[in-house]
Amino acid sequence: MIVKEILPNGLTLLTETMPHVRSVAVGVWLKRGSRHETPAQCGISHFIEHMVFKGTKNRSAEVIAAEVDSIGGHMDAFTAKEYASFHLKVLDEHLPLAVDILGDIVMNPLFDPAEMAKEKKVIFEEINMVEDTPDDLVMELFTGAFWPDHPLGRPILGTKRSVSGFRRDELAAFFRSVYRPGNILVAAAGHLEHEATARLVGRHLGDLAPGGRSRDGGPPRPASRIVTRSKKELEQVHVCLGTPAYPQAHRDRYGVYILNTVLGGSMSSRLFQNVREKRGLVYSISSGVSAYSDAGTLTIYAGTSLDSVDEVVRLSLEELRRMKSEPLPAEELRRSKDHLKGSLMLSLENTGSRMSHLARQEIYFGRTFLLDEILAGIERVSAEDVPRIASDLFAGEMTMSVLGNLGRYRPKASQLRI
């Protein structure tokens, strides 16, 4: 059973009771992320995510870690473009302590300057890690080229320059303005009772002063561009191709998921079979959809040799043209629907994923879709819907990022016309 309650200060609580498990996953979700930062604040949401675990008025960083370890709990946090989350998974009997810890880090962070200095070094290493992970880096290059001069195009981690400039008073002021009940959602799933959970959340987060919501920069305008970056130490060339896609709540969202599954979202997909299996041009090739509140992208990623880049791009665009011009065979449609439904149901088998699922649906839809509603939405997609959606998305020129030991190689814009 799923229950939604708005607490007196405006904070939203969502719970899902799962009587046949012994764990509970509970998370504090902030309905604000890196897109709600100014250019000077780039990376501040992610930095705060790190800093709240570095000590509160009541607990040191060591005490927080020791308390979680002493109950066999699992604690994690992340920052995304449009939200951030701190969550704990514990045995049902330890839910009061889990809510106490989460409430403490949200209500009472210290932002100690000495800890800030140390954590800046940690984040610099995280930025270095992206630089050393080519498939991540080529996506960052793509996003910056695709949405230039918009917060969605900036890196979640920020830059070394922006992070190094953060001061304690800035962090505290940003935290106070953003961590308000109107921006906060608490989601919990597992062996719990809603009323008892509501009392716990009210006790630990009920004193947050009402307020919330802030600007998001408006919808981005996508750009058709080519961006290249040479890294001589790389053996492979990494390529990302992309085009605009639909926002999260679009009526054709299930059709896009089907299209993506057929194109490159599974091992039986057209890109994997035709580019890797039949021709051996890549080790890795896939497509993916990223959807936000007012924008989205569909991207193709491939890692290949310098000699094969143009051929991989040509074959990828060929598959996009096929998606537009040919009806989807019934067998392929059935396989992609079953793949999507199976992946969804398997992903929701544990309390942590159920808790995240609840929170994301509330953030983007303001309601929870029951599993049967989602499965019915997938089933409603017809063979005619896919070429119609493909014709809408695959028009004009694509954006492309290329990373590797490129020498004099530069792709031509004419290669990217669909």
Image (cartoon, helix red, strand yellow):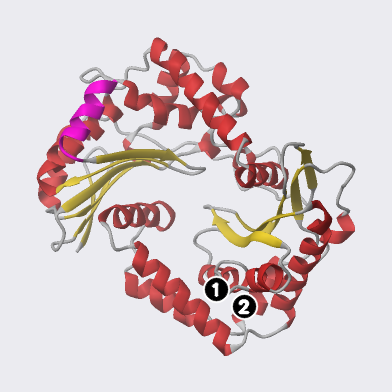
Q: Quadrant of the C terminus?
A: bottom right
Q: Which residue is mark 1?
A: 258
Check contact, mark 2 vs mark 1: CB within 8 A.
yes
- Could one spot residue 177 in this view of the protein? no
Q: Position of residue 327 (x, y in %)?
A: 67, 85
333 horizontally vs 220: left or right: left
217 horizontally vs 354: left or right: right
247 horizontally vs 396: left or right: left
Q: Position of residue 36 (x, y in %)?
A: 52, 36
Q: Is residue 367 magenta?
A: no
Q: Nearer the viewer, residue 394 or 308?
A: 308
**Residue 333 sits in quarter:** bottom right
Mark 2 or 1, nearer chain start: 1
What residue is rendered at 27% in x and 58% in y? 350
Q: Position of residue 369 (x, y in %)?
A: 35, 66
What type is the residue that disc 1 sits on? Ile
The answer to whether 337 is drawn above or below residue 52 in the figure is below
**Residue 364 sits in quarter:** bottom left
